[in-house]
């Protein structure tokens, strides 16, 4: 008789310090296409059937003009579905629902942090009570991430030099006599 194979789950405390492995599957993450399609279907379902806190925060984000730093709702990043994410800033806003698993959320936040996405957690009750009060830490985190990106860009330019501009092709039409 052959030995049966069983699914062995790792203890979360053993993998707490491990960074995620980025592979060539699943748009850069180690995820099968089938699992990735299921995640996108779940994200679409979450967008269609959002909680009251999600709806309130989405309405507040729609009123605000963030310029190129817009937030998208229920976006798939790796194997996580993020409530709101701004890819240019590398900032995600997660709404903490009362029935949520905190250990899983901390593990997900750590793996997202390893790839450069900072996760800001806001309780759903705070959003439902006062959306403006919930926006203050979001604005602060956005400003901090923007300053960090500017500092990193300046350090990179000072170390490697700025990219050369294209040579001029002569005077402009309005400069000619």
Image: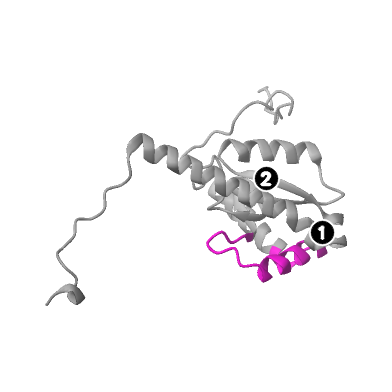
Per the image, the residue denoted by label 2 is 119
Instruction: Point out residue 141 in the picture as x, y percentages from the top left corner.
Output: 66, 48
Instruction: Point out residue 110 in the picture as x, y percentages from the top left corner.
Output: 66, 36
Identify the mark nearer the N-term, 1 or 2. Answer: 2
Q: Quadrant of residue 177?
A: bottom left
Q: Height in image: 56 above or below 119? A: below
Neighbour tally class for label 1: few under 14, some 14-19, many 20 plus, Cα within 10 Å: many
| 82 vs 119, nearest the viewer | 119
Instruction: Point out residue 113 in the picture as x, y percentages from the top left corner.
Output: 62, 38
Q: Is residue 89 left or right of residue 43?
A: left
Viewer can see residue 38 = no
Label 1, secondary structure: give it: helix
| 13 vs 87, nearest the viewer | 87
Instruction: Point out residue 42 in the picture as x, y percentages from the top left corner.
Output: 68, 57
Q: Is residue 112 left or right of residue 46?
A: left
Per the image, the residue denoted by label 1 is 127
| Magenta span | 47-72
Outermost residue to the left: 177
Q: Is residue 58 left or right of residue 99?
A: left
Residue 107 forms part of the magenta stretch? no
| 68 vs 4, nearest the viewer | 68
């Amino acid at each position: 008789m052959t030995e049966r194979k069983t699914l062995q789950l790792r203890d979360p405390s053993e993998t707490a310090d491990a960074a995620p492995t980025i592979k060539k599957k699943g748009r850069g993450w180690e995820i099968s296409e089938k699992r990735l399609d299921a995640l996108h279907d779940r994200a679409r379902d979450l967008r269609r059937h959002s909680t009251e806190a999600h709806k309130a925060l989405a309405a507040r984000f729609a009123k605000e003009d963030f310029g190129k730093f817009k937030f998208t709702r229920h976006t798939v990043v790796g194997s996580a579905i993020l409530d709101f994410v701004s890819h240019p800033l590398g900032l995600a806003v997660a709404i903490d629902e009362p029935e949520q698993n905190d250990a899983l959320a901390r593990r997900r936040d750590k793996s997202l942090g390893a790839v450069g996405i900072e996760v800001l957690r806001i309780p759903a009750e705070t959003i439902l009570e006062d959306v403006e009060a919930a926006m203050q830490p979001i604005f602060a985190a956005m400003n901090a991430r923007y300053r960090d990106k500017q500092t990193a860009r300046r350090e990179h330019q000072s170390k490697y030099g700025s990219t050369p501009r294209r040579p001029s092709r002569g005077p402009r039409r309005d400069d000619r006599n």
